[in-house]
Structure formats: C-alpha cells, structure tokens
Amino acid sequence: MPIIEAQGLAKTYRVAQKKAGLAGAFKSLFRREYREVKAVSGVSFTIEPGEMVAFLGPNGAGKTTTLKMLSGLIHPTSGQARVLDHVPWNRDDAFRRQFSLVMGQKNQLWWDLPAGDSFQLHREIYSIAPAEFQATLGELTELLGVEHLTKQAVRELSLGERMKMELIAALLHRPRLLLLDEPTIGLDVVAQAKILEFLRDYHARRGVTVLLTSHYMRDVEALCDRVLVINHGRLIYDGPLAGVIERFSESKLVKLRFETHAPEELSEFGDVARKDGPLAELKVSRSRVAAVLAAVLERYVVVDVSVEEPPLEDVISRVFQEAEPAHDAA
C-alpha cells in the first residue's frame, strides 16, 4: 500500500484586491474585490514505502502548499489524498504520530530554552516511553555529532546546529514519513553536507519514507532517485532523476582539448559554451553528437574529448522558465 496517494489535489485561494489611494481603500471597506489564485491544480502521484522522492519547482509553484495538504495543515479545494492510510486533513491522532514535517524557515523548538527541554516536551506530546526516548535521542545526537549542544539555548546555536536540532525533534517519535521543506536553506556547504549525510544514514537504518523539496540540486542528487517536478501548480514530470535531463534537455556537452588553441570556426558545429586556450565546450543536439565528433576529429588534431550531460541545475532552471503557466497560478 502506498505511503502517499494523491488524486487531483487542488488548492485555490481568494485574495482580496486593494485599490490604490485613499478613495480605493475607503471603497474596499464596503465592497471588496477578489481574485482566485490557483496554488495547486489537480496534482496526482503515489509514493511507496521507503522511497526518497524530490519535489521540485520554482518559488510559488505549489510545493509547500502540497506538503501542507499532505500533512493536514490545510484542506484542499478539491481532490483526495490518503497518507499513511489516513485522510490527512481529518488530523487523526494515529496519523499525526506517524509523520513529521520539517520546514527550513520555521522553528518548532523554543528559542530561549535548550533544545533538550523541547525534546522532553516532544516526549510528553507523543507519549514516548522514557527508555525508548533516551535510546532514540542518543542515536540521533550521535549521528549528528551534537551530544554537547542539547543543553545550550537554541538562540545561541548556529543555523546548521539549529537545523540538526530540528531534525532530532522531528524524528524522536520515529515517524514512518518525513516531509522536508527546504531543510538546507541558508546553510553553508559543510553544514549542508552533514545534513545530507545524516539523512542518508538515517534512511538506511530506519527505512523512513522521505518527500523532499529543495532548490539545491546537490540535495536532490545526494538523496533521491525519483523526482516530481511541479510548476504553476501542475505536475509536469514524475520519474527517475536520470530521466529529467534526457526528457527536458535537447543537447549534450562536447568537451574538447586541442593540441594548440581552440579553432575559431567551432560555432559551425554547435553553440560554443566555453573557449579557453586549448579547451572548448560545445552544446550539441543529442541527435548530432556522433556526426559532430566525426567532423571535428577529421578536421582538427584533438588531444582529448568527452561527451557529458548538461548540469542538472541548468536543465531544471530551463524547465521552470519554459513551462507554460496555468491560469492564475501561484
């Protein structure tokens, strides 16, 4: 049975339109005008137990709104969902004990108290047995290397340390489903790497199902084999991570190293992405790679050559820019 099953999920907001000037503000007191904003438009997908799935999209695409519906924080305008065999917006206790939602820009810990005190509060909320609580807390703090920080006020911790504490709080009750909304946002490269390493290790140990949103493709490539791409509230891709480039990129990168300087005439073979001394990179249509390589090798002395896929970040960025907007999409 799928951990998550969404069918035609949609969320539309009515947003009041404020007219300019004092007269407009006065008129709005008596007759407000509204417009509809479709944050999510009929999204459908399933996620099986143990999967780690990335949920990608630009700002305003509907990612966070979808996570909030799946976690029961908001009701959909239309559509259905079952998460952990529950209707999430019914907010059954049995459902809420089986998942966690971590939002990189929101805190669930008390700012002026040590994280350890918030952990004790979570133990009471979820009725975790003391022995199980201590064992889980010890495991998580050891994996994250923060045993010495649990007695320090949360406001005194660095951003990376706070995120580690947020993850500990989210996992103390050993949820089956972990919803992560930008967990590494604002973190430096070292902190990001440690968070990703922890998530990989924890998934290997516990088999928790993960749905991750992130603007960092490094997060996605490190954790997920499957991606959902959403834009303007609509799901435009659901498949393997490797298939994103093949589906949305029409070209490959042909990297060449010449014996001397790269020739000036390379533009006739493809778009010149880079030329620096003997090095050159060409963006070539997938269907023409073999022909272009044969023509270049026949005409010039090439010391080294390689054919690579374009960076995932570039492909995803182009997908976001080129996708057709839905009506009144958020």
Image: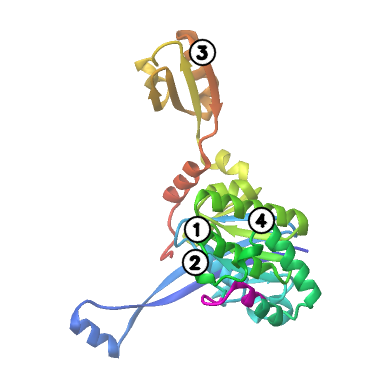
Q: What residue does disc 3 label?
A: 303
Q: Give the range drawn in magenta.
A: 110-119
Q: Is residue 13 positioned above or below 204 on the image?
A: below
Closer to the camera in the image, 148 or 264: 148
Mark 2–mark 3 distance (CA, rounded to whole Å): 49 Å
**Pointer 1: residues within 10 angstroms few (<14), some, or many (20+)?**
some
Say which of marks 2 and 3 sits in front.
Answer: 2
Q: Residue 105: which numbered mark, if any?
A: 2
Horizontal side of 216 relative to 146 (left or right) equals left
Q: Callout 3, which amino acid?
A: Val
The quarter holding residue 51 reads bottom right
The quarter holding residue 24 reads bottom left
Q: Where is residue 35 in the image (x, y as percent from the top left)?
A: 37, 74
Q: Callout 1, which amino acid?
A: Ile
Q: Residue 199: which numbered mark, if any?
A: 4
The single residue placed furthest to the bottom in the displayed view is 30
Say which of marks 1 and 3 sits in front.
Answer: 1
Q: Which circle's residue, 1 or 3, is located before the other in the chain?
A: 1
Q: How many labels does the image show?
A: 4
Mark 4–mark 2 distance (CA, rounded to whole Å): 18 Å
